[in-house]
């Protein structure tokens, strides 16, 4: 019984509420915003720049700086894969949002999220012909 993390029902109600709000927001956005998909592939008309899917644009943007950046992507993936076994912080005593004893893990996650978000926005809106940087406005 000592392997379990203590949690209150209030925490799980917050998780269910956050999940329901995120799902409702996503469904509402999906109903009104078109997916940024292109037409079928045509070898005679290759787009310039040829961009990857929106969820992979951050990797395309990062690799456009240097081919060695692929190792950063692989390292980030391995870090998150092995995160439960890395000695970054002590085990949680109770279930909470962003606990203090897990500050390093929370910081790594938030920094990675915002970095990926910024790289995706740059690749989606600020890359023009031949992958040159352009102002999207």
Image: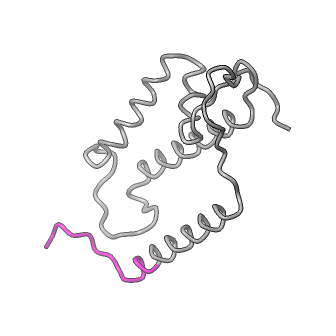
Quadrant of the image containing the C terminus? top right
Q: Position of residue 99 (x, y in %)?
A: 42, 62
Quadrant of the image containing the N terminus? bottom left
Left or right: 96 with respect to 112? left
Q: Residue furthest left?
A: 1
Residue visible at 37% across and 83% down in the picture? 9
Magenta stretch holds residue 2:
yes
Q: Quadrant of residue 73?
A: top left
Q: Nearer the viewer, residue 97 or 41?
A: 41
Q: Residue furthest right?
A: 137
- Magenta stretch secondary structure, dominant: loop
Q: Is residue 97 above or below residue 34?
A: below
Residue visible at 82% across and 31% down in the picture? 135
Which colour assignment does the render follow? one colour
Left or right: 112 with respect to 38? left
Residue visible at 28% across and 44% down in the picture? 87
Q: Quadrant of residue 21?
A: bottom right
Magenta stretch holds residue 40:
no
Residue visible at 61% across and 35% down in the picture? 40
Q: Position of residue 13 (x, y in %)?
A: 44, 80
Left or right: 68 with respect to 130? left
Number of disc labels: 0
Q: Position of residue 106 (x, y in %)?
A: 45, 52
Q: Nearer the viewer, residue 91 or 114?
A: 114
Query: Magenta region: which residues?
Result: 1-13
């Amino acid at each position: 019984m000592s392997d379990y993390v203590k949690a209150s029902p209030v925490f799980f109600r917050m998780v269910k509420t956050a999940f329901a709000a995120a799902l409702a927001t996503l469904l509402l956005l999906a109903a009104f915003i078109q997916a940024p998909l292109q037409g079928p592939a045509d070898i005679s008309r290759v787009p310039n720049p040829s961009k990857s899917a929106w969820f992979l644009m951050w990797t395309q943007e990062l690799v456009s700086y240097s081919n060695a950046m692929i190792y950063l992507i692989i390292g980030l993936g391995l870090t998150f894969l092995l995160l439960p076994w890395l000695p970054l912080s002590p085990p949680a005593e109770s279930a909470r949002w962003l606990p203090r004893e897990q500050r390093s893990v929370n910081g790594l996650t938030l920094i990675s999220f915002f970095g990926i978000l910024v790289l995706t926005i740059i690749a989606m809106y600020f890359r023009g012909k031949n992958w040159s940087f352009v102002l999207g406005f």
